[in-house]
Image (cartoon, rainbow, N blue to C red):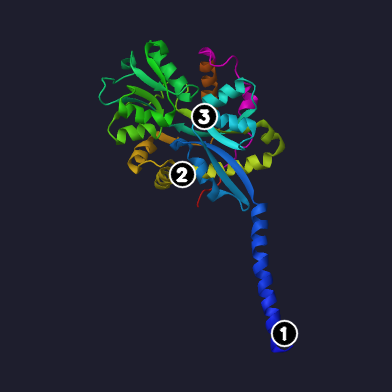
Amino acid sequence: MNKFRRHTCVVIAVAAVALAAPFAQHTAHAQEKVIKVGALKLIHSITPHFYQQFAPPGYKIEVVPFESPTDSKNAVVTGTVDFATFGIAAAMLGAAAGEPVVIFAPQCNGGMAVVAGTKTDIKSIKDLKGKKVAIWPGSTQEVVILERLKAEGMSIKDIQQIRLPFSDMAPALARGDVDAYVGAEPGPGISLANGTGRIVEYPYSTPIGSLNMVWATRQEMIDKNPGLVKIMMDMHIKATEFAMNNRAEMVKMTVQKLGQQQKSIELAVPNVQLTWKIDDEFIKRARAYGALMLEKKQIRQLPDFNKFINASFMPTSAPAAKK
């Protein structure tokens, strides 16, 4: 083969590789499995943002943010997302109404606080009487504050309930639009950091304790693709353990995803316990929660807990989270 022919072959080969590269990348991208995961814009819903670093090859995690727990739950039920995290209240409301929502792991304990303005005289739950208090209807916090009011010999009629989403509570308190709020982190951390709020209490003295958010999917996913649920369970455990053992990374991720000041997040983190275990205590608290919702006529009937909470994906031992 003369020099000209050798040169021509090399040029053709190089051109062929160059032309093939985009198609190879496209094919690889096309084969990538995208999993849509719903998450609230809260620090105790930060775990899904860590999933990607523990995802198996070929899986891409797309986190879809939601403002409302109910919206996140509805997205799971309708198939808009494959999995999602939201409050136990939203999950209970759906399951009690016959929706195919299934809890297969807890997401977070804690993350709640009753916060009052520093310019008010509110120092206890009893001091909320007659005050403007922001509460998000259908949230876990709503059930908790109703129970706390009951324990103090009060009811929702004793306060001026103001309907507000969690992200609006801290700004509303700072402006003086409300006297207090029953919020979710990082709201309380923000109010502490900017000096406009103080903690009245972390309301964990009710029968449901600090139970808050859950990790869920729909029954169809359990039935048709249990292998994927198992993969997501593995990711959830590793991400949870990593975030809890690396609080600096948890703060960094939250600042990045929620756009809040680091000081606010650092003040919020101690009030958040990310978790993944379905154990006897979780079942006990979930049943107590359902009983409270039924008593308060927020649901007409209890869900079938044998279907509503599926512990079959719990591992015998937790996978290591070393990334």
3 or 2: tag closer to the N-terminus:
3
Q: Whole-Å distance between the Cαs marked 3 and 1?
A: 68 Å
Which residue corresponds to the image point at 69% horizontal and 88% vertical from the top-left? 3
Residue that carries the numbered disc 3 in the rendered image: 69
Which residue corresponds to the image point at 42% horizontal and 46% vertical from the top-left? 256
Q: Which labelled disc corresponds to residue 5? A: 1
Q: Are marks 1 and 2 in contact (CB under 8 Å)?
A: no
Residue 291 position within the rendered picture, expressed as x and y whole percent measured from the top left:
54, 17
Q: Nearer the viewer, residue 93 or 194?
A: 194
Q: Is residue 270 left or right of residue 107?
A: left
Q: Which residues are magenta?
A: 294-317
Q: Is residue 86 magenta?
A: no
Q: Amino acid at mark 3?
A: Pro
Q: Whole-Å distance between the Cαs marked 3 and 2?
A: 22 Å
> Where 302 falls versus 23 (above or below)?
above
Select label 1 or label 2 by which is in front. 1
Q: Which labelled disc corresponds to residue 243? A: 2
**Is residue 235 at all visible to an observer of this figure?**
yes
Residue that protrudes farthest toward the right in the picture: 1
Which quarter of the figure is the N terminus placed in? bottom right
Residue 26 position within the rendered picture, expressed as x and y whole percent measured from the top left:
65, 57
Residue 257 position within the rendered picture, expressed as x and y whole percent measured from the top left:
45, 43
> Where 3 falls versus 253 (above or below)?
below
Which residue corresponds to the image point at 43% horizontal and 25% vertical from the top-left? 164
> Where 69 falls versus 26 (above or below)?
above
Residue 285 position within the rendered picture, expressed as x and y whole percent measured from the top left:
51, 24
